[in-house]
Amino acid sequence: MELDERAVLKRVFNYMILILLAVVILAPFFIGIWTSFLPTMDIAKGNLFGTNVSLDNYVAAFTRTPILRYLANTVVIATITMFAQLLFCSMSAYAFVFLKFRFRKTFFTLLLITMMLPFEAEIIPNFATVKQMGLLDNYAALIIPFLTSAFGTFMLRQSFLQTPAELKEASDIEGLNHFQFYWHIVLPYNKISMITLGAYSFLGAWNQYLWPMLTTFSNNSRVIQNGLKQLQSEETFNDWGMIQASAAIIVIPTIIVLFIGQHYFKSGMNEGAVK
Amino acid sequence: MAKYKKLTLPLILILGIVLVAIFGKAISAKSATNDNRTEVVFWHEMGGPSEQALEKVVDGFNKSQIKYKVVPKYQGSYDEAIQKILQTHNTSTSPAVFQAFDISTAQMLHSGYTTPVQDFIDEDHYDVSKISSVARAFYANDGKQQAMPFNTSQPVLYYNASLLKKYGITPPPVSPSYSDITRVAKELYEKSGHKTKGMTVQVYGWFMEQALANANRQIANNNDGHTGNPTKVNIDNPDTVEFLKWIKENIKADDFIDYGSGASAGANQTAGFLSDKVGIFIQSSASIGQLSKNNKNELGITYFPHPDGKKANGVAIGGAALWISNDKPKNVQRGAFEFIKYTLKPEVQAEWQKATGYLALNKDSQKTSTLKDLYAKNPASKVPGEQLANAKANFANSGILMEGMQLARQLEEVAMETVYNGGDINSALKTADRSINENLTQLNKANGYK
C-alpha cells in the first residue's frame, strides 16, 4: 500500500512538471493565436482580455494584402527545395556508402568542411554569383543555391551505413544494378531518415528570411516571411491584429507538414526490415 | 490500391506546383500589361498601412501621366534596402528612383550612384521655396539638393490631456522647456496617487541628437558634415549633459518610467501611454495615427522640449527622401523627377499627411481642405506641422551628414542607458565620444576620405 502511494505521488509530481513546461512553451503560441482575434487598439493598449473577438483580422489579411501570393510562392519554393534535396542528398549519400572509389574519404571530409561554414558567411559571394547570373528577383535565386545540402548528405550517409550488408549481398546475387538497389531497397529501408530530412528541408525553406530578403525585389517573387515583415510599417500606424492573424496563417502549413511527417514516422517504426 | 495510395501525396504536391506555376504566371502577365509608357521602377520601404497610402500616390501619378509609369516595389526595412540599392546598382533589377532614410544620406552621397535632383530643379526652374527648408537642408550638400525629402517626421512630445484636466494640472506650453515638462510630470505623478508615471524618454539616439539640435549644438565638425566630411564628433558637451540631467532629475523624483531601447520599447511605451500608465512621452510625429485612432483620451502635443533659458532652435527631420539613380537612361531619370515633383504637390502631400501621419512638406498643403478638416477634427494634430514650419534651417538642425550614423546611434544609446541605470553622465558621454570617434576615424580611413 505504502509503495503504491509513493508511485502515485511520483506520477502526479511528474505530470505537474510536464504540465508546467507545456504551459511555458505553449503560452506564447496561444497568446499569439488569441491576439489575432482581437482589435488592434486592444493589442496596442496591452489589453489582452478583450471581448471584441472577431475574424476581422483574418478577412483583412486575405483581402487587403498579397499574402496568398506569398504563400503560393513559398509553397512552390519549399516543395521544390524539399524534393531536390531528397533526391540529390540521397544519391550522393549512396555514392559515399555503397560505391568504392579513390579519395572517397577525402571527398567526404571536404563535404563536411562546407558544413562548418554558416550560410550567413557565404552570403556575399553567393549574392555576387546570383547577380552575375542574372537570377535576382526570381524563383531560381531562391531554389538553386539550396538544391542540395551537406547536412542532408551527411545525415543520410550515417543512416545508409546502418543498412545491413546482407541486403547488398542479396541484391547482388539477385542481379540488381546500383539504381535498382538504391530505389527499391535503400530508399524504402531508410524511409524515416528520408522523411526527417524532407520535413527539415521543407521547414528550412519555409522559414528563410535573410536570403530572400536580399535577392527578391517584388511581390511576384516575395516569400511569406518577408511578406510578414512587409505588413509592418517603419514609424507609423501598425495594424497589429492583422499582422498577428497573418502570422497565424503562416504557421498552419508548417504544422501540417509536422503532422504528416509524424504519421509516416510511426508507420516506419512499425515495419522493420531485417529480423 | 496501396500502391496508388502511396502516390497520392506526391501527386497532390506536384499538382499544386503546376497549378501555382500557371496561376503565378497569369498574375505576373497581368501586372505587365503592355503600354508604351516608360517604366520607372521605384523602391520603397513603406510597409503596412503606409504602403497602401503610398500606392495611392503612385496610382495618382500614373493616372496623370501618358509618358511615364511608376512601378512601386517594397524592399524591406530602411537598413536592408540601403544594402540592396548599393549592391544591385548597374544591374537590370536596380531602381530608377528609391527611398533612402535620413541617416544614410552621407553614404548615398558618397556612393556616387545618384544624380542630384538639383540638376533637374535647375533644368525645370522648379520653385523649391514652397518646400520646408529644414527638410530640404537635410538632404542638401554644398548648396546642391541631392535628394528630395518625402516621408518626413519630427519628434514631438505627446501628453494625455484628459488626465491633466482630470487632476487640474496646467498643460505645458506649446514650446516647453525642460522644467515645464518636469513640473507637469511631477504633478501628474503626485496627484494621480502614484498611479500614473509622469513621463518617459525612450533610449533612442535620435532623441538625443534632436535635443542637441534644439539647443543649437552641432555634434560633428565641419558644420555637422554640411561643409565637409566630419572627422570628429563631440557628444560630451554641456547641452547633452543638461538633457541627461533633466532625465536624471525625473528618475530621482520617481515620476519617470524607463521602457528601454529598441522597437519593443517603442511599442511598450505606446501601450503604457494609451492605458494611462504614463502621461508624457516623446515620439515621432508619424505615430499620431496610432495615438489618436480609437483613443478615448484627448491627445495633447507640444514641440520637442528645449533647455531652460534658451530659445528652441528647432529639431531636425527624420524619415526618408527620394533619390534618383544614375545608372538609368536620361528619359527614365526624367520620369523619376516627374514623379518626385508629383509627390510634392500640395494636395498629394496633404492626403499623405492625413493617411500616414508624416508631415506635409509643401507650405500650400496647409491651405487645402484636406488638412483644414483634419485640424478641425483634431486640433492637436496641427502642432507637428507648426513645429516644422517654425524652424529655420541652420547647420545644427539639418541633420548630421556623416557615415556610420547607425553605429554612432547605438553608442549614444549605450550612454543613455548607462545614465538611466544610475551611471555617471560625464564618464558615459566620454566613453561614447571615444568609441564614436574611433569608429569614424576607421571608417574615413577605410573609405579614403580626407
Image (cartoon, coloured by chain):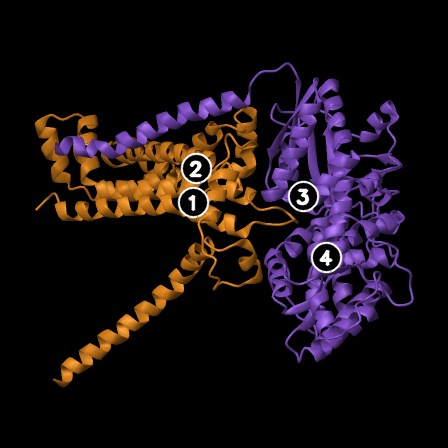
Amino acid under label 2? Leu
Residue A194 can be seen, yes or no: yes
Q: Give the Cα separation between the discs numbered 2 and 1.
A: 8 Å
From the viewer's perspective, is A204 left or right of B193?
left
Q: What separation in Å lies between label 2 and label 3 (alpha carbons)?
A: 28 Å
Which of the numbered marks, if any, corresponds to residue A71? 2
Labels 2 and 3 in the same subunit? no
Marks 3/4 same chain: yes
Task: Tell me the tag on residue B205.
Answer: 4
Q: Residue type at mark 1? A: Ile
Q: Residues within 10 Å of mark 3 (few under 14, many from 20)?
A: some
Q: Are marks 2 and 1 in contact (CB under 8 Å)?
A: yes
Q: Is the residue marked by circle 4 packed among few (<14), some (14-19), or many (20+) residues within 10 Å?
A: many
Q: Secondary structure at mark 2?
A: helix
- Where in the figure is residue A222, as x and y percent of width and height? 51, 35
Task: Report the residue at 54% width, 54% height from top.
Answer: A40
Chain B, hue in figure: purple
Residue occupied by mark 1: A250
Give the residue displayed 76% in from the left and 25% down from the top: B338
